[in-house]
Image: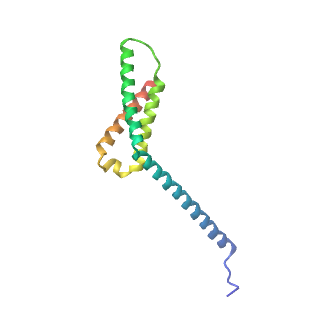
């Protein structure tokens, strides 16, 4: 029986398999830690405060833009608009990643749908303005 040894190529594949399994485990552990971090970030009251303040500042920003257009004053405020779009898009993505199916089926699904429509409209508007 000692003459029936495992060929070296099979031994290496076992080593490779365990290496891949180990790397896969490390990947998923890291992914789960980052998912937990993102979930705790979104649930934090300061995160909600920052989003609410961004919504309020965006409303003021839009009012200022309309007022300046009515006065026919040319001021380039596109950069500020892109910052708000970035914040709102990131918020939608964060909630979609953390809530998964609950984003579409959970208690806040109607608000999520409304927020998504508003952000998509903002993105389309900015895209059409650049053309």
Say if 6 sits above or below 80 in the image: below
Residue 80: % across, % down: 46, 26
How is this picture coloured?
rainbow
Please name the residue shown 37% across and 24% down the image: 60
Of 45 and 87, the residue lying toward us: 45
Of 48 and 77, the residue lying toward us: 48
Please name the residue shown 47% across and 19% down the image: 76
Of 51 and 62, the residue lying toward us: 51
- The answer to whether residue 1 is left or right of residue 76 is right
Residue 40: % across, % down: 43, 49
Image quadrant where residue 59 sits:
top left
Say if 28 sits above or below 104 in the image: below
- Of the 4 image quadrants, the one containing the N terminus is bottom right
Q: Is residue 93 visible?
A: yes
- The answer to whether residue 70 is left or right of residue 25 is left
Residue 117: % across, % down: 34, 37
Q: Is residue 131 visible?
A: no
- The answer to whether residue 108 is left or right of residue 21 is left
Residue 89: % across, % down: 43, 37
User: In the current view of this chain or complex, which residue is farthest to the bottom?
Assistant: 1
Please name the residue shown 38% across and 40% down the image: 48
- The answer to whether residue 105 is left or right of residue 28 is left
Say if 70 sits above or below 24 in the image: above
Please name the residue shown 67% across and 83% down the image: 4
């Amino acid at each position: 029986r000692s003459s029936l040894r495992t060929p070296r190529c099979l031994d290496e594949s076992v080593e490779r398999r365990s290496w891949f399994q180990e790397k896969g485990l490390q990947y998923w552990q890291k992914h789960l830690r980052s998912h937990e971090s993102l979930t705790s970030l979104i649930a934090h009251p300061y995160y909600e405060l920052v989003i609410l303040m961004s919504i309020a500042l965006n409303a003021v920003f839009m009012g200022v833009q309309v007022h300046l257009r009515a006065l026919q004053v040319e001021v380039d405020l596109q950069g500020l608009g892109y910052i708000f779009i970035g914040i709102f898009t990131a918020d939608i993505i964060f909630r979609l990643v953390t809530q998964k199916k609950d984003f579409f089926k959970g208690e806040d699904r109607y608000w999520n749908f409304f927020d998504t429509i508003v952000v998509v409209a903002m993105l389309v508007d900015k895209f059409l303005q650049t053309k």
